[in-house]
Amino acid sequence: MNSDQIFKNRARALDEDLTGRASTAGADALLAEIVSLERTPARRRRMPSSGRALLGLAATAAAVAVIAPGMLPDGTPPAGPQPTTSLSVAAEPTARQILLAAAVAVEQARADGDYWRVRTVSQAMLTDPTRSYVLEEKRSTEQWLAKQPDLRSWRIRQDLGVKPATARDEAAWRAAGAPTSWRYPENMKTENLFAVPFGPLEAAAGERTAEQLRGTWKGQAGDLAGKSLTWKETRAIPGEPETLRSYLEERIGRLDLTGSGMDVEEARAHILLRDCVDIISTLPASPETRASAYRILASLPAIRAEGEMTDPLGRRGQTLSYQEEIEPGLFSKVRLVVDPSAGLLLAEVRTNTTELADGRRAELRVTTSFQAVGWTDERPDLPTRRN
């Protein structure tokens, strides 16, 4: 079967641009065809000459694997009798399959609008100043970047409150007098902590506040590899996987990493991974560029699949993980929760452990959940309080 016929089968197997509903028979047939192609010895394969066609073929297999029966977004099995097949299409997808399926889906994303909007909810665990228990801080952030000069760019924030992280932490908090605010000393030791607040923490939620982005933010579309990008520069980011990787590696090569405490090549490989995550999560790059970032991630050996996971906002997605060195010799586990049917990064979760004053080992997590990422013609709902 040639690649054109495979893509025709894909069109029959998938419904409404990879929203997660699939024709079971079509998906099984397509997956069987892809598997048979992959099992053919390399010297006997007749593969498309175009590199992009090859990537598309791989993504096709991934898309079907991800939306196979037993893996629908709402967790329910497909209705009606299921065809008997010798293939286990409900098997856990690999990291490569998940990422390539997301690449196919994100190519269908909207490519323009009045605002590039990124709305997130972040949750951070940290110890109280005495290291007696763990707190969880939560806040929401909306960033509305206007491409046209006649529109204003905004950042809207709200502290959503602080509370003990677990029932055990709540018991220790009550034993400490159930404080409603916490002040951290400037000289507090930070071993195995992600961060220590500069100012006091308050248990109560704060007021929603808007800040107009001025100065260096005016005309800025975001940043990559630690440097700001204008809208023109962002539009010029390559859309092909090979050229995008070369573009990123060239930018990374300009960075002075000699004082990072890490092996320079390892540091560059990590920055490449992080740049790709930034492209798919926050940067207003083209759908083709975001798809290529997924494809680069799919080629990296450091990323592993861990099955389904529910993110902090209750959404289910496929979990990918890798290790990140947050300082020399101190590693954090990073999980990416991806919705491959929509090509969206749902959440990023970093996990570390620390020791409390009583010797108990406690898990600390820092999470960013992406509620909305993409172009919109809507206008921000600005609060009364503005900076």
Image: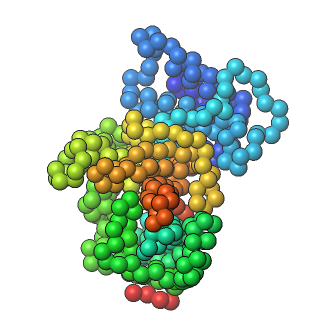
Q: Quadrant of the N terminus?
A: top right
Q: Would you say 284 lies left or right of 16 here?
A: left
**Viewer-nearest residue: 151 or 261:** 261
Q: Residue furthest top?
A: 44
Tally of numbered discs: 0
Residue drawn at (60%, 35%), measured in percent from left and top?
92
Residue drawn at (62%, 56%), measured in percent from left and top?
315
**Viewer-nearest residue: 335 or 109:** 335
Q: In the rendered view, would you say 32 is above or below 238?
A: above
Q: Quadrant of the C terminus?
A: bottom left
Q: Residue furthest bottom?
A: 384
Dividing the picture into quadrants, the one containing residue 54 is: top left
Residue drawn at (33%, 68%), measured in percent from left and top?
189
* Residue 279 percent across, percent down from the top left: 39, 53
Q: Would you say 284 lies left or right of 176 here?
A: left
* Residue 370 percent across, percent down from the top left: 51, 61
* Residue 159 percent across, percent down from the top left: 50, 78
Q: Would you say 246 lies left or right of 310 here?
A: left
Q: In the rendered view, would you say 259 is above or below 79?
A: below
**Viewer-nearest residue: 233 or 339:** 339
Residue drawn at (58%, 56%), measured in percent from left and top?
311
* Residue 337 percent across, percent down from the top left: 53, 50
Q: Residue furthest front?
A: 358
Q: Residue furthest right?
A: 80
Q: In the rendered view, would you say 190 is above or below 104?
A: below
Q: How is the image coloured?
A: rainbow
**Viewer-nearest residue: 327 or 157:** 327
Dividing the picture into quadrants, the one containing residue 233 is: bottom left
- Does the rendering let one see residue 76? yes
- Does the rendering let one see residue 150? no
